[in-house]
Amino acid sequence: TGKPVRVIDRDTPTGLPLGDYDAASLGMDRVVDCVAALACHAPPLAVFNMGTATTLSVVDGWGVFRGGMILPGLALSLDALSARAAQLPVITLAPPEGLIGTDTEACMRCGTLYGAAGAIEGIAGRLEEQFGPLTVVLTGGNSAYVHPLLRIPVIWEPNLTFLGLRELWLRQGSGGKRNPPTAADAPQPSGAIGWFRRPLRPAHRRGGTAHSGGFWSRRHVMTSFDARAAL
């Protein structure tokens, strides 16, 4: 494209204090996710990214990264079952047809997906005991299978990492400072999908799954093409 490329690495000023965490072992994708979540929602935050592994990144009420967890991802869990249990077949991820399965494949899917949902709900509850009421943000390629099953309020943002990359690009372009965002800041994606920002506020505290309720509205869905254009 002839455009300069900015690489996000451990020398990039992200504005996210890492506290006592060992920065040398911290994946930058987790940092970028936290940057995006903090740009949208008030801390404390619990950010779950469901990819090859399911990672949890926790930001406390002061905006400091406190650590998290790394769990086996959904596909990895299914692959391990198939590889190590002789009678269990190789299956693919798909939405469950109910809470419990009536055949082996359905049981594997239900166990994997509802097990992941239960883990998120349980971990979030324990985190609130330590950090107080917090906003749970869910992202990652496999999050679409799990977020309809959750019974706690969450912000589902599939493009969180892209939004974090854009946020860091905007900060670097302004010397590391970020002025209060306005609608004029937004690149208009192809198709002119509606895009607007709201003031900082915590996630909705009601039952069911909430969509993005901070700066980024779920009326705007940034595709990978749009995100590359924004960068």
Image: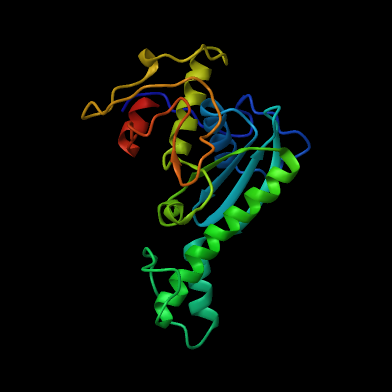
Residue reaching furthest to the front: 206
Image location of residue 74, percent across then percent down:
49, 62
- Colouring of the image: rainbow
Looking at the image, which residue sits at the far left?
Answer: 191
At 23% from the left and 29% from the top, the residue drawn is 190
Place residue 89 in its image quadrant.
bottom left
* Quadrant housing residue 220: top left
Q: Residue furthest bottom?
A: 87
Q: Is residue 220 above or below residue 56?
A: above
Q: Position of residue 113 (x, y in %)?
A: 48, 63
Would you place residue 179 above or below residue 220 in this image?
A: above
* Residue located 57% across and 13% down the image: 177
How many numbered circles does the render carry? 0
Q: Nearer the viewer, residue 109 or 78?
A: 109
The residue sitting at the right extreme is 20
Instruction: Say which of 60 and 74 sits in front.
Output: 60
In the displayed structure, would residue 77 be above or below residue 121?
below
Tell me: 146 left or right of 3: right
* Residue 61 at least partly seen: yes
Q: Quadrant of the C terminus?
A: top left
Residue 90 appearing in the image: no
In the image, residue 171 sits, relative to residue 21, either above or below, namely above
Q: Nearer the viewer, residue 175 or 216?
A: 216
- Residue 6 lies left or right of residue 3; in this view the side is right
Left or right: residue 119 versus residue 211 is right
How far across and down, in percent of the image, does residue 213 sit? Answer: 46, 31
Which quarter of the figure is the N terminus placed in?
top left
Q: Residue at x 45, y 76 (%)?
A: 107
Q: Position of residue 140 (x, y in %)?
A: 46, 48
